Amino acid sequence: MTEKGTLNTEGGGNVYTFVVSSGAGKAEIREEIMHRYGVKPRMVHIIRVKPKTISARGREGQKPGFKKAVVYLRAGEKIEYA
């Protein structure tokens, strides 16, 4: 959870951010949100985070990239975390 993601959730923006599988599409993410949380997303955006090169103790390595989904819900709906 990032600072921006936290502000969107707490500020009443009905926006939630999830790290998802690299092969997941918008339709699959929408169906999974409906199945797990019982709410129908208004909109789903997908962001691909590229891998980053890092240097630690004189050695170069790479942080893996990942895919995240930004899920927008209708007004009045929210996701309850268990």
Image: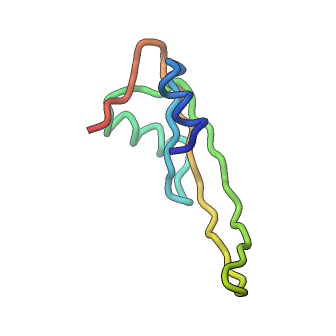
- The single residue placed furthest to the top in the displayed view is 76
Q: Is residue 78 left or right of residue 5?
A: left
Say above or below: 46 vs 48. Answer: above
Say above or below: 51 vs 44. Answer: below
**Rendered-image quadrant of the C terminus:** top left
Say above or below: 46 vs 37. Answer: below
Residue 37 locus on image (x, y percent): 32, 34
Q: Is residue 82 left or right of residue 3?
A: left
At a point 59% along the width and 59% down the height, the residue shown is 66
Which residue is more in the foreground, 35 or 15? Answer: 15
Q: How many marks?
A: 0
Residue 68 locus on image (x, y percent): 57, 49
Q: Is residue 45 left or right of residue 28?
A: right
At a point 47% along the width and 45% down the height, the residue shown is 28
- The single residue placed furthest to the left in the displayed view is 82
At a point 56% along the width and 43% down the height, the residue shown is 2
Picture quadrant of residue 55: bottom right
Q: Colour mode?
A: rainbow
Residue 8 locus on image (x, y percent): 56, 27
Say above or below: 80 vs 65. Answer: above
Residue 33 locus on image (x, y percent): 40, 37
At a point 31% along the width and 36% down the height, the residue shown is 81
Which residue is more in the foreground, 42 or 7? Answer: 7
